């Protein structure tokens, strides 16, 4: 179950890497133009950023997110069974944390860190703030 749960965040990171690769490859060729080329670049940039945000959100260990399934895989069976009783309340907790902006500093810091890491890893030479 843990490997299946990791597939979501890993696919988000891979999608972000592909989008950043395309962005970096096309930026020099079409950065001075406007219209559809600029829209395509902006779409790649935001696709990469949103994919990073989804990857970070998914690894939070609160049910029903994938991070909880990975965490639960490493727990002893008795602890796992106790936590499963409260799994249905995880979504309510998640809604409360998002609504009260409790998770916003963590999510934005982690998302920006992942995005910057991937951009540096891919050697994104031109970083544009759109």
Image (cartoon, rainbow, N blue to C red):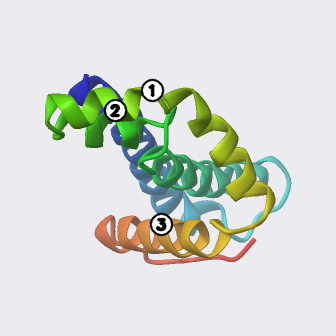
Residue 42 is situated, as x and y percent measured from the top left of the image, at: 71, 57
Image coords of residue 55 (percent x, y): 46, 48
Dot 2, how many residues are within 10 Å of its Cα: few (below 14), some (14-19), or many (20+)? few
Q: Residue furthest right?
A: 35
Q: Name the residue nearer the viewer: 107 or 31.
A: 107
- The location of residue 33, given as percent across then percent down, is 77, 64
Q: Which residue is mark 3?
A: 115
From the image, tell me which residue sits under label 2.
82
Task: Indicate whether 127 appears above or below 86.
Answer: below
Foreground: disc 3 or disc 1: 1
Q: CA distance from mark 3 to mark 1?
A: 36 Å
Secondary element type, mark 2: helix
- 89 or 18: which is nearer to us? 89
Residue at (56%, 55%) from the top-left corner?
A: 53
Quadrant containing the C terminus is bottom right
Tag 2 and tag 1, C-beta contact below 8 Å: yes
Residue for point 20% across, 31% down: 78
Judged from the image, the secondary structure of the residue bearing numbered disc 1 is: loop
For residue 96, above or below residue 2:
below
Mark 3–mark 2 contact, CB under 8 Å? Answer: no
Specify whether 23 is left or right of 13.
Answer: right
Of pointers 3 and 2, the one earlier in the residue sequence: 2
| Image location (x, y in percent) of residue 57 | 53, 50
Q: Is residue 31 left or right of residue 25?
A: right
Query: Which residue matches tag 1?
Result: 85
Asked if the residue at tag 1 contacts the one at tag 3, i.e. Cβ–Cβ closer than 8 Å, the answer is no
């Amino acid at each position: 179950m843990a490997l299946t749960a990791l597939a979501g965040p890993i696919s988000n990171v891979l999608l972000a890497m592909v989008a950043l690769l395309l962005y970096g490859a096309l930026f020099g060729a079409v950065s001075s133009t406007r219209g559809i080329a600029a829209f395509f670049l902006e779409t790649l940039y935001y696709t990469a950023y949103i994919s990073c945000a989804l990857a970070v959100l998914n690894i939070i260990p609160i049910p029903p997110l994938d991070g909880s399934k990975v965490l639960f895989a490493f727990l002893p069976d008795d602890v796992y069974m106790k936590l499963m009783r409260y799994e249905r309340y995880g979504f309510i907790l998640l809604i409360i944390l998002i609504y009260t902006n409790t998770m916003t500093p963590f999510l934005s810091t982690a998302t920006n860190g992942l995005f910057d890491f991937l951009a540096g890893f891919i050697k994104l030479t031109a970083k544009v703030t759109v």
